[in-house]
Image (cartoon, rainbow, N blue to C red):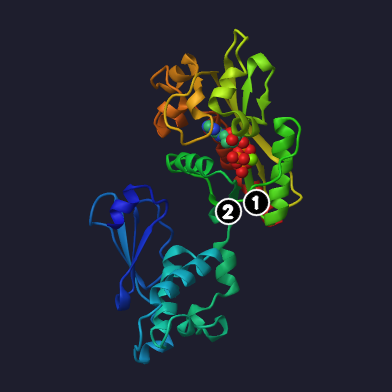
Amino acid sequence: MARALLEKGVRTAVIVTLGERGAMIVRRKGDDETVEQSTTDVNDDDDSNHETIMISEPADLPHQALPVVDAVGAGDAFCGALAAYLSRGVKLEQASSMACGVASMSVRKRGAQESYPLAQDLPECLQLDNKQQSSDGEESERRGTITFVTGNKNKLLEVQRLISSDQGKSVPFDLTNAKLDLPELQGSPEEIAREKCKTAANLLQSAVMTEDTSLCFHALNGLPGAYIKWFLDGLGHDGLNKMLQGFDDNRAYAQTIIAFSPGPGKEVHLFDGRTEGRIVPPRGSLDFGWDPIFEPLEEECESGDIDKGNTYAEMTKDDKNKISHRSKSFEKFRHFLATSSGEILKGMNA
Ligand SMILES: O=c1nc[nH]c2c1ncn2[C@H]1C[C@H](O)[C@@H](COP(=O)(O)OP(=O)(O)OP(=O)(O)O)O1
Ligand SMILES: [Mg+2]
């Protein structure tokens, strides 16, 4: 089961809790951190790709002498404590062992929340000392979190798919999502993207990514552009087609501008991606915006090695991602994160 989850694309490791026997970490070989704990036992001969590490609570946990009275809430105690230790820079094996210790304390009191120890009640072996945090918090080990602020679930789904197909090119950042529909000023797509990103960073007081997508008709000098949302809502697919009647050019390009800011008041970085196509009568699934009326040009399809002549809405999600405006801008953003991660992490913490 743990291995199946790893094969499905879990990034770091799968942890299985085993009640009084502690927990088990399963991960791909080669993804290891230094194992320093006497509480761990690595077994890497179960198959060639994975290793299993058995974790137990710290041997000097004073509560081991007390009777177990109630297991309610132990799993939540483990997960909460694990998240807290990891977020403070403790390595996975040690954080898991300490989380087993917190869960072990919780089963020695009745109830769920009431059974969780307060920070001041933790015995020494479950407390963080400063030495441990600073030695584990070196630049090469650090990760940052970026919040993708969007009110559009389809954008989020496509970006999540791009990230999960990105294995091997991973960057030291995790993406979370906040569903906010932010105000969008009038102006060029770049100005709109920049201002929206600044607003998001100020609102959330954190590192954020936003994205703005435009659909630009060549015959109309780039309009509706950034205002496509309002045109689509007001006119529908047929109305957008009718706008081009009387012109002999039905070409259009889709453009995504990703905007990234490491925090409130910090510089905004822009990454754009474009895909050229034609506006056609609607064909395919009606799931996402103007996908049914946008047919990418033959050259675009050739460059992604996918079938020609389909609208975005007739393609699989993976094929769309091979050539889409969104994937092109995301690729530039990913490259920026990979090449400037040290500087960005410093900026995020400054
Ligand atoms: O790949 C796409 N395929 C088809 N339609 C798309 C695509 N990407 C955005 N769209 C639609 C959504 C909205 O009608 C407009 C862009 O407006 P845009 O402001 O960027 O999106 P939004 O307001 O829905 O979400 P957000 O909260 O991120 O601003 O084009
Ligand atoms: Mg919007």
Q: Position of residue 297 (x, y in %)?
A: 50, 16
Q: Is residue 10 left or right of residue 258?
A: left
Query: How many numbered marks are there?
Result: 2
The crowding category of the residue bearing disc 2, from other C-alpha atoms within 10 Å (few below 14, some 14 to 19, many at least 20), is some
Q: Is mark 2 within 8 Å of ligand 1?
A: no
Q: Which residue position holds label 2?
A: 145
Q: Which residue is the site of mark 1?
A: 207
Observer able to see residue 336 = no
User: Which is more N-terminal, label 1 or label 2?
Assistant: 2
Q: Picture quarter containing residue 239?
A: top right
Per the image, label 2 sits on a secondary structure element best described as strand
Whether the residues at callouts 2 and 1 have beta carbons within 8 Å, the answer is: yes
In this rendering, the answer to whether 70 lies above or below 342 is: below
Residue 155 placement, left or right of 342: left
Depth order, front residue of 204/127: 204
Q: Residue at x 55, y 39 (%)?
A: 334
- Amino acid type at circle 2 is Thr
Residue extending furthest bottom? 66
* Quadrant in the picture for the C terminus: bottom right
- Residue type at mark 1 is Ala
Give x and y (percent) for residue 61.
42, 84
